[in-house]
Amino acid sequence: MAKPIFSNLDNLSLQDIESEAELIPLLTSEDEEALEKEDLPAEVSLLPLRNTVLFPGVVIPITVGRDKSIQLIKDANKGSKVIGVVAQKDQGVENPGANDIYSLGTVAQILRVLKMPDGNTTIIIQGKKRFEIDQITSEEPYLKATTKTVVDEAAAKDDTEFKAVAESIKELSLQIIQENPNLPTEASFAIKNIHSYSFLINFVSSNMNLSVKEKQDILSLKNIKERALLCLKCMNVEYQKLELKNDIQSRVRHDLDQQQKEYFLQQQMKTIQEELGGISYEEEIDEMKVRAKAKVWTKEVEAHFEKELMKMQRMNPQVAEYSVQRNYLDLFLDLPWDNFSKDKFDLKRAQKVLNRDHFGLEEVKKRIIEYLAADDLH
């Protein structure tokens, strides 16, 4: 297994990066002190980035595709390997000029240049120190500018509020890593091993799912406490979105699992019924629908039948209520809706039939004749 190298910007060389060692982008307090003491170049070549912002101390890979950018990397890699990295205001601008980039950026060290199989060039860079563009000195063959140092307003050593905010950033970062399935759990080890609050803010800000404008706003704040508060605010918004997204996915997954379970059980039941030679659940429903089409019903009766049939479809065929509902619908279908015969009120014929078919029961037969006579009057 490759031996990890904890990067020290002063001692790190391209030869170290090109070895098989694994680079772990964690800064120590000594590294940060060395960066603060390091002087900015009087003039730097500017590399505009479309969709990201580089923070001090953070290592990121960049794919370079524009001719000017490729030429810049070639020239810088032959020399000091130091460039100025700035973010574009509009990602759609193909050839950005002085007005298309932010005035505040980060000086970066080129750690490695890779030629990709698709012809693109990928560089691995590490942010060193923030700078502000003083004046654009050249636009050909690429942008060059003189720089001004951006002085950080550090928090006091006994500032408990700043420490509390920084610790909240660390804790919330670990929660986001745990909740987000797209983030590797190994990232939590990196967060736990960051002991510098300023680098923690830079590292988290760089890896958050924010727009270029939002990241640039964090980078541009000179007061580290204000930077920490803005970072924590953005993290809370991201965490709330992540919780909501996970909650929705969990509910949808539960509903789908329940539907799949019910479908699986219904298919099993159907197979068992077919093996036993009985009518399957679906066949019963289909048979009732066919019988219903042959009925001459009013709209109210038809609507009631469909409602009760849907109720039966939602039932589990194994419960007792299913049989009650099925018998009710069978009776509903068997009733002679709007079909009736014309009654014949012939009392003499009725008396003759009663005497022929029933011996005795004179009182009963008398009552029947009286009932038929009463209906005849109506």
Image (cartoon, rainbow, N blue to C red):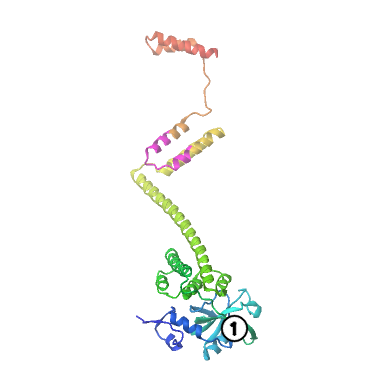
Looking at this rendering, what residue extends furthest in the front direction? 158
What is the number of callouts on the image?
1
| Front position in the image: 215 or 199 | 199
Looking at this rendering, what residue extends furthest in the left direction? 276
Q: Give, as a three-letter code, the residue at label 1.
A: Lys
Looking at this rendering, what residue extends furthest in the bottom direction? 79
Instruction: Give me the residue at 44% from left, 89% from top.
Output: 15
Which segment did they paint magenta? 308-327
Residue 138 in view (yes/no): no
Quick check: 266 left or right of 142? Answer: left
| Front position in the image: 270 or 141 | 141
Viewport quadrant of the C terminus: top right
Instruction: Give me the residue at 55% from left, 72% from top.
Output: 218
Instruction: Give me the residue at 42% from left, 54% from top.
Output: 257
Q: Which residue is mark 1?
A: 148
- Predominant SS of the magenta segment: helix
Which element is circle 1 on? strand
| Front position in the image: 358 or 28 | 28
Quarter of the rendering containing residue 153: bottom right
Residue 314 in view (yes/no): yes
Q: Is residue 132 magenta?
A: no
> Where does residue 93 sit, x and y in percent of width and height?
63, 76
> Where does residue 53 sit, x and y in percent of width and height?
55, 75
